[in-house]
Amino acid sequence: MTLDREICAALDRDDPLAAFREEFEIPDGLIYLDGNSLGALPRAVKRRLADVVTQEWGAGLIRSWNTAHWIDLPQRVGAAIAGLIGARPDEVVVADSTSVNLFKLATAALGLRPGRRVIVTEPGNFPTDLYILQGIQRLLNDRVELRVVAPEHLAGAIDGDTALLLLTQVHYRTGRVHDMMALTRRAHEVGALALWDLSHSAGAIDVDLNAAGADLAVGCGYKYLNGGPGAPAFLFVAQRHQAQAQSPLSGWMGHAAPFAFSDDYLPAPDIRRMLCGTPAILGLAALEIGVGIMARADHRQLRRKSMALGDLFIRLVEQECPGQFTLQSPRDAAARGSQVSLGHPEGYAIMQALIARGVIGDFRAPDTMRFGFTPLYVRHSDVYDAVAHLKDIMDSGAWQDAAHQARGAVT
């Protein structure tokens, strides 16, 4: 059956999540397919931040650490995120960036498995994950071995020398989903720990850390959780590890009694020990709004729509642009996150031509065009219109315009 716009419009009319779009600022005429990189602005964030700035900060000043409960925000927002990732409220806290949290938890994992020196990961993992592991290796004077193996060989690479398996559940480039339960089980069979990066998972696919037996996890606040650019990240430590896990960044907010101001560090007895410095209140306040919206949505409906939007995009691209792109994502929606990646040697210029027309995705070198489908605000008709623009760009050769060849600092 040939897909047309009326079919897509009918799907939008029947969409049980359609009302959520009104909670986000989407400029008229813009098709936003980059929520896998930066989520759209929730309308309520502007009101919330205005209140934090004018009332809590402006009028309350330092009193607001108590009166507005700023001091509790890392745990409060963490508890809300816990409900999205299959964790207990006391197992998640919001702090720092994903990169910093990776450093804290990977180092803590090595401490939990003394005598073991191997960390297993995969090539092509998100660069910051690999860079942080390389930094730990240098910090420990190469007493850590990084075992970087292809996905199909991961299970066999995890052995009795392995301290930690570190993987991103949804691959940032292809959208491929790892089997968290099976790989975590394999790590546990040999006494290793499993640390999962949920940056492209939380709010996009079903995640159940405790059902999978995960030990540790980190995740991003500014993608599907819509916390805004540079939003604070989150981390998870299974309750069974909290009393023993030691953060290498023993900052004052991780102290058992930070306002005792003692000279010697004593870690908090719970997830708070993974805090470090003073929490970023403006960022936390914005993130709390985005997480709250996500928490109100039916997770099963979110995943069904996410898969349907990706399937629709693939069918339309193959219908309208046959043979012109390489599908770099799994065709099976169950094996794919909330994005579809297309390969093309001129992918950068093609994406710039799309952006110039108000269809926003992004590009990852050397040849990957990424299209994210955030089910809270992306419509089926948006997908149809995006592919119509893509077809016209390819048919007309508009991507060859010199303006689309110049590379910006951020791609």
Image (spheres, grey):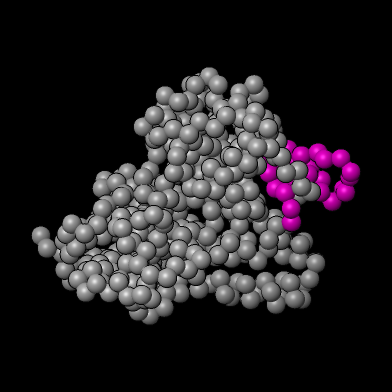
Q: Nearer the viewer, residue 229 or 212?
A: 229
- The answer to which image quadrant residue 195 occupies is top right
Magenta span: predominant SS is loop
Q: Residue at x 59, y 49 (%)?
A: 99
Q: How many callouts does the rendering have?
A: 0
Residue 292 visible in image: no
- x, y (%) of residue 223? 48, 59
Q: Residue at x 87, y 40 (%)?
A: 264
The quadrant of the rendering that contains the N terminus is bottom left
Q: Magenta residues?
A: 254-278
Q: Nearer the viewer, residue 406 or 314?
A: 406
Furthest residue toward front: 402
Q: Residue at x 89, y 45 (%)?
A: 262
Is residue 270 one of those drawn in magenta? yes
Q: Is residue 82 left or right of residue 345?
A: right
Residue 387 visible in image: yes
- The answer to which image quadrant residue 284 occupies is bottom right
Q: Is residue 204 above or below residue 271?
A: below
- x, y (%) of residue 122? 45, 37
Q: Is residue 267 above or below residue 67?
A: above
Q: Is residue 238 above or below residue 31?
A: above
Is residue 343 one of those drawn in magenta? no
